[in-house]
Amino acid sequence: MPTGRRRRRTRYGAALLALLTVVGYITFRTLTGAPTECTVQANGERVALQPQQAANATTISAVASSRRLPEHALAIALTTAMQESELRNLRKGDRDSLGLFQQRPSQGWGTAQQIMDPVYSANEFFDELVKIPGYANLPLAVAAQQVQHSGYPQAYVKRVGAASVLASALSGRVPSLSCRVAPDGGTGSAAAVRVQLTREFGLQVDPQQGTLNMSDASDGSEDSIVLAAVTPPKPAPRHKSRRKEKAAQGANAAERNAQEEREEQEERERGWVLAQWAVAHAQDLRIAEVSYAGRAWHASHSGEGWVKAPATNANAAGHSAAPGQSHEAVQITVTR
């Protein structure tokens, strides 16, 4: 159980490099009697979760992504939450422990109401994790213990394997999360999806990153919304003489290409963080379809997992990528 005095959480937002389209969709097919389950397969291993566990795991990954934390930080958080609560937002625990990470109000982690908010509790965990010198080089169980100060530190070790598999997928590096859901015939709300995304991915201004630009191209209806958020453009390079500039171009060409490839990969991974988040939350938010990077997931036949998306799904409604982006939009369709 976590102990130690805590300071108040500081929330850090970061730009979400994805264009989100939520449109109305009518679905007629339903699953009958199919069990609900989410699975992740990576590194030759498979992890199975209930939809609510998967939703909580992707909320943790959304918070990590919003803070631009590495996959290792996400794996530490998942190791901890899997051991403390089995990724369930528990209302009871040892003494006054609560929530995903079994944080205690009496030990300065916040009020009971705050701790029961998975976004808050994940941010609280990461606030403490990043204070640990060299945490990025620590074994997962060791780092988890340094945050939690549990009376049973060895218990984290047994969660390391599954947490590593989950982190590799939910970070977007090896995207593989898929959920089998049972649509209940209810209708979804694009507005509700947008509110949840804004809360979990922290679409707000970060003083260290600059101004966050947001644009809303919705037509005003509840079932259709386009949300774009991009980071500020990079500052223009300082003036150089032609000779120095030519020399620099030659010397730095390979480095620039490598940097562009890294940025493109990071952008692609952030898109998958969002896409997998939508699938994991599909049951609660009544999401009918998610598509990204040429793949699509459909609630009406969710047992098939991610399938090849029709060409028309690649950039639905004429929305390709937000300014400064190179990838197609992440598209989320709600049931109505």
Image (cartoon, grey):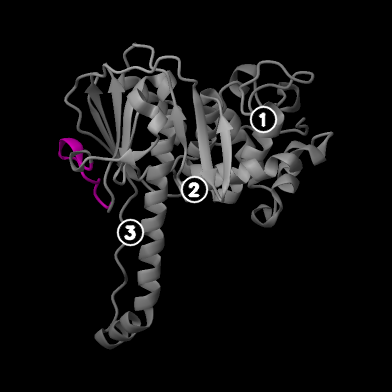
1 or 3: mark nearer the eye: 1
Q: Label 2 amino acid?
A: Arg
Question: Looking at the image, do the residues carrying marks 1 and 2 touch, with CB atoms under 8 Å apart?
Answer: no
- Sequence order check, earlier mark of 2 and 3: 2
Residue positioned 40% across, 66% down in the render: 259
Q: Residues within 10 Å of mark 1 (few under 14, many from 20)?
A: many
Magenta segment: 314-325
The residue to which callout 1 is attached is 101
**Distance between the alpha carbons at the discs numbered 1 and 3:** 37 Å
Name which of mark 1 and mark 2 comes first in the sequence: 2
Is residue 34 in sight in this rendering?
Answer: yes
Question: Can you tell which mark lies on residue 293?
Answer: none
Q: Position of residue 178 (x, y in %)?
A: 45, 34
Q: Residue 25 in the image: x percent, y percent?
A: 23, 22
Q: Which residue is mark 2?
A: 68
Disc sitting over residue 234 in the figure? 3
Instruction: State the residue at coordinates (77%, 34%).
Output: 4
Q: Amino acid at mark 3?
A: Lys
Secondary structure beneath dot 2 equals loop
Q: Identify the residue shown where x is 73% and y is 22%.
A: 97
Q: Quadrant of the N terminus?
A: top right
Main SS of the magenta part reads loop
- Confirm or deny contact between disc 1 and disc 3 (CB under 8 A): no
Instruction: Work out whether residue 159 or residue 71 is closer to the camera in this orientation and state it.
Output: 159
Can you tell which of label 1 and label 2 is closer to the viewer?
Answer: 1
How far apart are the two marked residues, 1 and 2, measured between alpha carbons? 20 Å
Measuring from the top left, give residue 48's x and y in whole percent. Answer: 57, 33
Q: Quick one: SS at disc 3?
A: loop
Distance between the alpha carbons at the discs numbered 2 and 3: 17 Å
